[in-house]
Image (tube, coloured by chain):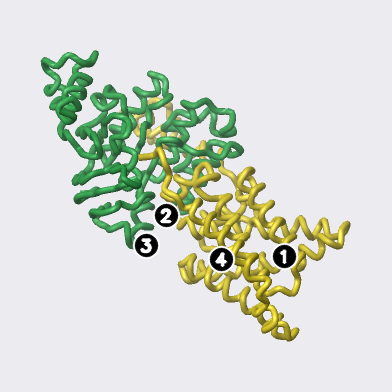
Chain colours: A green, B yellow
Amino acid sequence: MNVTLTDIHRSFGKNKAVDGVSLQLGTGVFGLLGPNGAGKTSMLRMLATVLPPSSGEIALFGRDPRGTAARREIRRRLGYLPQSLGYYPSFTVVEFVEYFALLKEMPSAAVPKAVAAAVERVDLGAKAKAKLRTLSGGMLRRVGIAQAIVNDPGLLLLDEPTAGLDPEQRVHFRSLMRSLGESGTVIVSTHLVEDVGAACSEVALMSGGKIVFRGTAQDLTARGEGHGVGDAPLERGYSAVLAEARS
Amino acid sequence: MISPNEPGRLPSADDWSGGIDLGRVWAGIAAEVWRRRPGWTERMAARLLRSPGLARALVTTPSLLLPWVIATVVVFGVGALVSLGPGQPLVWLVAPAVAAVGIAFAYGPGIDPAWELSSSCAVPDRLVLLTRAVAVFAVNAVLGLLASVASGAVAALTFGWLLPMTAICALALAVAVAARSAIVGAGAGVAAWAIAVLAGQAAGGQLTASVTNAHADLPYLAVAGCCAAIVVYAIRPQRGLQ
């Protein structure tokens, strides 16, 4: 298992962001759905080893990230796209991706090819030498995805990756996620249920810091039969599970 | 039947279309075209620091404009304050802490736009911060040296503050890299600075008098309080991200 969470809690003051989540994940694309404030971003930040849990155990690639050496080893195999991607406006696309490849301690000799491959995979070859300040929001999102996949991560954490992408790019990105999920664990947090239906082998729905549903997209769709809220079958399933969790 | 590899036969594009991964070929070409050749400073830093990532952080520090401006203002401001209070060892001992807090704040989560990404990377963020401190002091020391030609006050600031702090930060980074611990490196830097300041005061016979000066207690407490407040602010949990 690449990811093992045992009774994870995380609080910010009195607000419980994550409340007793346990999870085991192997390879594949895992969708994390939920309304705003459900705890998805806190979950991803803990998995990215940026935010420590208030209590509970995390094991990534079988290692405990609390140990300095283990954390460093985990981070070499990690790809992370935060919800709001901060970037350096004066860097070019290639410089930005390369900078993070080096901070991920990739072997220097492998970096140029890995950067070129990552930039091409997100279809930004034509903008490789463009300054980040000149790019649109959707292009910046793709730069963020490129830096996340540059080290061919065993665990890829994507927080709202398709926000700002046009329909063509979203279709392209779903195919990229499926291909990355064949060799590693991809966890994608999103509001867009169609992304989950198209790309995820498994889905979890979070509400109030807890996982209130776990199964396939088909299972979630089935939960929505006879439920009135939502335009698409998967949306109806999402609404039905949320309504049940809140009642 | 003629084999594609038969002598005397030129290969055609059809012979190879199934055997070549064009994506890989293009990535190889793109890598060569887009490759950024590191300058001698970066190559030397990568060798000394044993980390191309730290070397890149070092050379790119001045290009992060807002953090750079804030860090530079803090460094020069503290340097100016230090030059106003010569002979006070506690001022000299506290000054690097204030400068370090300023640099940490400038390149910390509140200002550095990519801090969240950097802190999820394998190169420890404290080592990156030490590297940034070296860059801030070193580049400003070079600028100070150039400006020293025109101004005696800048020369005093450069030789009395920027150059010694560059040396101390470089020592701290060297120890941190050797010990693989930024805390150990920072400790070595603090120890070296304290020894240098106290030895200088002891040589002048002023050590006891300056430490027992009751009038200096309040300003020192105020400075310590400010440092603590900035540290608390810099390491606060990020709101709105849960």
**What is the C-alpha distance between the residues marked 2 and 1?**
37 Å
Discs 1 and 3 share one subunit: no
Q: Amino acid at mark 3?
A: Thr
Residue at image position (42%, 24%) is A165
Chain holding disc 2: B
Residue at image position (16%, 33%) is A213
In front: mark 2 or mark 3?
Answer: 3
Number of numbered discs visible in the structure rendering: 4
The picture places residue B97, in percent across and down from the top left corner, at 59, 64
**What is the C-alpha distance between the residues marked 2 and 4?**
17 Å
Residue B217's place in the image compared with A28, above or below, is below
Chain holding disc 4: B
Q: Amino acid at mark 1?
A: Val
**What is the C-alpha distance between the residues marked 1 and 4?**
23 Å
Q: Quadrant of residue A222?
A: top left
Chain holding disc 1: B
Q: Which residue is mark 4?
A: B173
Q: Which residue is at the front of the view, B16 or A7?
A: A7
**What is the C-alpha distance between the residues marked 3 and 4?**
18 Å
Q: Which residue is mark 2?
A: B122
Q: Which residue is at the front of the view, B231 or B103?
A: B231
The picture places residue A219, in percent across and down from the top left corner, at 13, 27
Q: Which residue is at the front of the view, A129 or B85?
A: B85
Going from N to C along the chain, the mark reached first, 2 or 1, is 1
Q: Which residue is mark 1?
A: B82
